[in-house]
Amino acid sequence: MKFNSLLLFLLFSLIGFSQNGRVAGTILDKEYDNEPLVFANVLIKGTTIGTSTDDFGKYSISLKPGNYTLIINYLGYETKEFPITIKANQTVTINHTLEASGVQLEDVVVVHSITKESESALLNEQQKSVEIKQAIGAEEISKKGISDVAAAVAKTTGISKQEGSSSIFVRGLGDRYNSTTMNGLPLPSNNPSNKNISLDIFSTDIVEYIGIDKTYNYRNYGDFAGANVDIVSKNYKGSGIVELGTGMGINSNAITQNKFYLQDGPNFHGFSNEGIPSNPLASYNFNTSWDKQGQTPVNSSMYLRGGDSFSFGETSKLSFFLNASFDNGYTYKEGIRRGGVEASQGIAKKDLYRKSYDYATNSNLMANINYKINNNHNLRINSMFINSSSQKHEEFTGVLDIFDNATEGGGFIRRSTFDRTALLVNQLLGEHKFGERTTFDWGLSYNMLSNVVPDRMQNTFTPSDQSDPSSPLIPSDLNQSDNHRFYQDMTDDEVAGNFTLSYKFGKNDDSSYKGKFIAGYSARYKEINFDATQINIGISRTITQPNIDLNNIDGYFNQNNFNAGLFTLRTFRGGLSSPNALDPQNFNGQQIISAGFGAIEYQFTPKLYVIAAFRSEFIIQDIFYDTSLKQGKTLFDTMEYLPSLSAKYELTEKQNLKLAASKTYTLPQFKERAPFLFEEVGQSYIGNPSLYNSTDYNFDLKWEYFPKNGEVISLTGFGKYIQNPINEVTIASATNDISWVNSGEKAIGIGGELEIRKNLIARENFSTNKNTNLSSGLNISYLHTTQDLDSEKVSRETDGLGVAFTNNDSRLTGASDLLINADMSFNKDFSKEKSLTATLSGSYFSDRIAALGVTGKGDLVDSEVVAVDFILKFKFNKNIGFGFSARNLTDPTIERKQDIQNVVVDSYKKGRNFSLSMKYSF
């Protein structure tokens, strides 16, 4: 009897199921040329039944026969309702094209941001693209509590950030192999030592997403081997919003100091620029004090941002986005700092203990205006001003020079550096369609950058009795630059333009096209000027020097002691009697790149897509220099021919196999070719005019699988072959200067990358908006690199630079064998207006070479590091939100060793960072 009842129940269940009907369709995005709108919400009003559109904008819902109301919405877009009647075994088709909402609707709260910034939307773009792409969007950035672009990029597969600098390494390749753009247009560098601008000066507040091309794209300049990082600024399309936010935080190291010290002069906001005093060699005219100033090390942040959209007629729309923000932060570190470790016994020439007080600011103003003239023409203006500054007050104690200065210890060096960068970016971009086949995209930019180091101060004091480290301190007279003030001024102005014309051909029956011709031109013209003046304070050796009070250094360096002849003032060009003593040491130059490119995109079969491209570039890089070492110029020009190939084969609807191959090049930087002496504590750098470009060959093969919306599993194999690689090395000189050379015939890198993003729990309730989501991400990169090192080659190709490599081959500098990033995020929506998000993320990189060993000395190797961050965000209601972050929870020891001698040359902890924030939207 029970068996028969069960059969009847199953029979009626099957009959009932078979009598269900279905509503299905496709949702398109009017704001993005009617492309499929991914992850739009489709639900049945008054029920918990609903779904989201897939990667192709499609949806399908099974319903019992009856009358319903279908609701379609998308964050920042209009909400549409459709009455439908479902009949058994029939499908009702509802297709619709959504547009962004420009008004506040009565029955729905329109959220200000559009989820084109979301992880899922970017994964959809990655899946559709023929080229191998990777990106991190505003949604993921916010979830992980990332405040700057450098930290955001370091969360992606195969990329790590160099400790103590803003440089990133992509698959083991450092600054010189990477490039940086904003909205596809180049950005200048804010540091003469680097090719790329510091990514940490860009606040993530202005970012819609960050595109990371680790394979060469023919639209980009060919000076590439690692990655091109493209910062895409926010393009607002939603309804009106104004948001105000503030926050405060601490660094565990900084807050526990009895007193936190910085130099005199720079202000809280980081806009200072102390110039060279008038008549600085004739008398003591410095306006700022040598004595350190106490500070309260509490971090703070504030921002104000807003945007709105206005519709005109049926197709025209004007939207704008404004952002103003200020952030600052205090950090402190202390530990061992050694230099000049000799080869035989591993004894350090300099053996010091460092205390470093650091303060950084970042001010940002951005205005973005987008004018959609109609469905075929769009104009965009983007203007941004960034002022970033850093103060570093360092104190070193110990052996200054084991042979002749504080040989038993007790020496003291104080160095205070204020570095300020002001960047103004102006961009005008256009997108135009002429019929259904032809498009024309263009962009123009004019960037102005100023980088100043005003009034860097350095003191060097030594024990009055060299055999007694505890004896009173007196000024060091060993080198003329032991005590000095330094002024640097660099400008980098650049004009650039991109122009691309494309034409579709081979129309199919479904109105799609099999192929596309692309032709384009891009050019950039850069002028750079670098001036530096160092006023050295020469200590008299004929007069008995008084003792120094470290709390009153002004008590020694003053007009009275200058008049008494205790010290003199001079530059590297000479003293007061030298007619050109105050002429700055200078290098300036121009760089011109003019490029043409063409490509064919073609769909050979329903599953096979290929892009074959060719780009040619004519490059001019001229440098003119006038330094205390020499005067002259170095001229350089070359023509580069750059073929590339990309292909995608769709294994299934959710799996792709992608291939990319290309030839590129690597240019030396201005500083690396200018014979200009840059001095740091214990180290000097000088350029090599004989340096020339490297040639790079790149290959990638990637399998990617997209199981569900917002999920991906991918595996990539890659290889790099670099001819005549450029490396930073110590050259044979009295002061062990560092220069740059083409160090060998070749460098090879091969490796693999694994990326997994998975939704572990996804519970959605469309009627109550009480949703729960638990997601995780993991990316792992393994890299093996090798390069040959040839001292004879360097000697043949340079003008007197002697290099004696310790090894005949080596790993690439900056290359970690293993990189791991992992995160887990929990999101709970209590209602439409209240939610909680918690993210735990961690990263690991194995040890890596920082500098190559020479003359029997081992390579300098940075030790492995594990870091963990925790971010918590709570949206209390539609207006108020709170945040808490705890970063660098593991607080690992950052350590650098000279490997053969096994001597630690640098060691410190960064401390843990904690912050609280609040925002109000209205």
Image: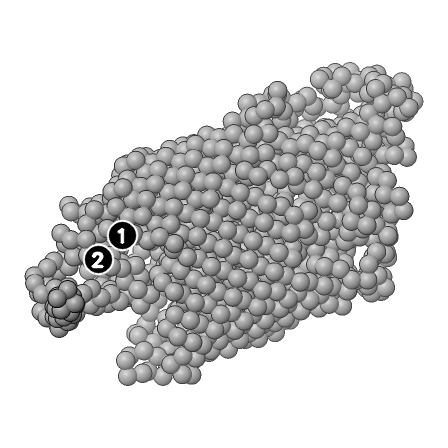
Q: How many marks?
A: 2
Identify the residue at image location x=86%, y=64%. 792
Any mark on residue 50, and which? 2
Q: Position of residue 104 (x, y in %)?
A: 20, 46
Q: Position of residue 119 (x, y in %)?
A: 39, 55
Identify the residue at image location x=49%, y=55%. 778
Identify the residue at image location x=56%, y=43%. 867
**Residue type at the position of mark 2:** Gly
Q: Is the N terminus in the top left, top right, bottom left or bottom right quadrant?
A: bottom left
Instruction: Tell which of 332 and 417 is nearer to you.
Output: 332
Tag 1 residue: 764
Residue 619, picture quadrant: bottom right
| Tag 1 secondary structure | loop
**Residue type at the position of mark 1:** Glu
When the figure is inspected, residue 748 is found, relative to residue 76, above or below; the finding is: below
Q: Tell me if I can see residue 644 in this picture.
A: yes
Any mark on residue 608, and which? none
Identify the residue at image location x=73%, y=67%. 746
Q: Is the C terminus in the top left, top right, bottom left or bottom right quadrant?
A: top left
Residue at far front of view: 1
Left or right of residue 685: residue 886: left
| Tag 2 secondary structure | strand
Q: Marks 2 and 1: CB-CB under 8 Å? A: yes
